[in-house]
């Protein structure tokens, strides 16, 4: 009897272990990355014919997607989440920033979080990331970078990685004849990915990272977060990191940064910054979003602000709310400095996946934007920044 009990217990343990590794990650991903109105091949997202015709001619670029965090094949059309290569092509997205997440606190919120806990460790184990990633944040970033590089290598040229301004020019030339291709570039959510060592920037740069956020949801050794406990400015290490990033041609991303960090970076910046995904207080007043003064300062710096697609960014759940936030940002800082920053696959509820970005084109038309303005916001501002400031 005892032997039977032990065997049964062993079987139950194996089943539980199999569920943890093979079913739990997908279940969690589905629950955290929701699309309000999913599309299908037979029923694409609704948009006016005028918007569809214009959208087909656009170079669309998105500054933020956390897709590499999830255990999905980037080359296969997924049944959940927001971004993969087939859906990027269907949505006519030319350039996608793939941003990696290395640590998030439990009970994450936009007001105050400490860095004492971590959700990503359990995810890394469940998704069978290399053991080296279980306790090392830099290794987590490098692993996710390898996932993009391996996908690009398997894509038969449909997915390419942008590392230099020459890569951008070559991709744009190719795309004149080949519409079904996408370029990606790598970014990081939070400088905690350097594991406290500024010298790790060299390793991250060599792994193709070209944009690094100074902070994510908690204060780190380099910079304070808008959602941290102390919300401090740049530390000495943080100032050194900004200098080295500028020297190497790596964009400083101020998304999630504490107000003091935004001020500190802009005071010393010699190159344009990026805010990869945010909202604006002018249409959605909360701790997560940028004030008009911050928008003006980033515009004076020549930076680019990506407007997010989720409800905390826009105080809405549709393309009209996104367009309203874009209209406000353009009115404050100018049309040359506003872009898209979806936060796709970043544990958000989005009004549509990346095949539905045409709805933003439609909403911008309804907001009264001219075609040349829509071209800039939907992607040309991002592409200009990449062509001008990548190494």
Image (spheres, rainbow, N blue to C red):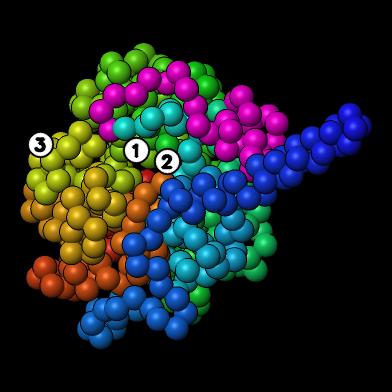
| Location of residue 55 with respect to 202 vertically, above or below | below
Q: From the image, tell me which residue sits under label 1.
A: 253
319 or 390: nearer the viewer: 319
Residue 27 shown left or right of residue 54 in the figure: right
Q: For the N terminus, which image quadrant? A: top right
Residue 195 position, x and y percent, is 52, 22
Q: For the C terminus, which image quadrant? A: top left
Residue 387's disc is none
The alpha-carbon separation of the residues under discs 3 and 2 comes to 23 Å
The alpha-carbon separation of the residues under discs 3 and 1 comes to 18 Å
Q: From the image, tell me which residue sits under label 2.
A: 211
Evaluate if marks 1 and 2 touch, with contact meaning CB atoms under 8 Å apart. Answer: yes
- Residue at x 20% of width, y 40% of height: 289
Within 10 Å of disc 1 (Cα), the crowding (few <14, some 14-19, many 20+) is many
- Label 3 sits on a secondary structure element that is helix
Within 10 Å of disc 3 (Cα), the crowding (few <14, some 14-19, many 20+) is few
Of labels 3 and 1, earlier in sequence is 1
Extent of the magenta region:
110-136
Q: Is residue 125 magenta?
A: yes
Q: Is residue 127 visible?
A: yes
Magenta span: chief secondary structure: loop
Give the quarter of the image for residue 116. top left
């Amino acid at each position: 009897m005892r032997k039977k009990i032990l065997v049964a217990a062993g079987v139950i343990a194996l089943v539980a272990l199999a569920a943890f590794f093979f079913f739990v990650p997908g279940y969690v991903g589905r629950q955290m990355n929701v699309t309000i109105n999913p599309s299908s091949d037979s029923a694409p997202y609704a948009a006016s014919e005028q918007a569809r015709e214009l959208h087909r001619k656009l170079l669309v670029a998105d500054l933020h997607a956390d897709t590499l965090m999830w255990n999905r094949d980037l080359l296969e059309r997924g049944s959940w989440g927001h971004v993969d290569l087939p859906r990027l092509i269907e949505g006519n997205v030319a350039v996608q920033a793939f941003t990696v997440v290395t640590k998030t606190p439990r009970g994450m919120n936009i007001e105050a979080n400490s860095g004492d806990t971590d959700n990503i460790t359990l995810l890394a184990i469940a998704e069978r990331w290399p053991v080296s990633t279980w306790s090392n944040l830099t290794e987590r970033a490098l692993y996710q970078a390898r996932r993009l590089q391996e996908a690009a290598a398997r894509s038969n040229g449909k997915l390419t990685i942008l590392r230099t301004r020459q890569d951008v020019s070559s991709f744009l030339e190719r795309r004149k004849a080949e519409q079904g291709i996408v370029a990606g570039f790598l970014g990081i959510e939070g400088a905690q990915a350097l594991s406290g060592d500024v010298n790790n920037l060299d390793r991250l740069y060599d792994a193709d990272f070209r944009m690094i956020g100074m902070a994510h949801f908690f204060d780190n050794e380099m910079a304070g977060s808008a959602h941290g406990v102390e919300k401090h400015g740049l530390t000495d290490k943080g100032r050194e990191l900004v200098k080295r990033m500028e020297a190497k041609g790596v964009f400083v991303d101020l998304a999630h940064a504490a107000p003091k960090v935004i001020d500190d970076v802009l005071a010393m910046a010699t190159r344009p910054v990026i805010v990869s995904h945010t909202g604006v207080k002018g249409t959605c007043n909360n701790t997560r979003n940028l004030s008009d003064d911050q928008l003006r300062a980033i515009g004076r710096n020549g930076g680019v602000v990506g407007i997010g697609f989720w409800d905390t960014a826009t105080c809405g759940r549709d393309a009209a709310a996104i367009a309203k936030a874009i209209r406000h940002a353009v009115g404050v800082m100018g049309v040359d400095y506003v872009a898209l920053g979806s936060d796709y696959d970043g544990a958000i509820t989005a009004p549509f996946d990346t095949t539905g970005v045409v709805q933003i084109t439609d909403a911008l038309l309804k907001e009264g934007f001219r075609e040349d303005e829509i071209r800039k916001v939907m992607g040309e501002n991002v592409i200009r920044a990449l062509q001008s400031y990548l190494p």
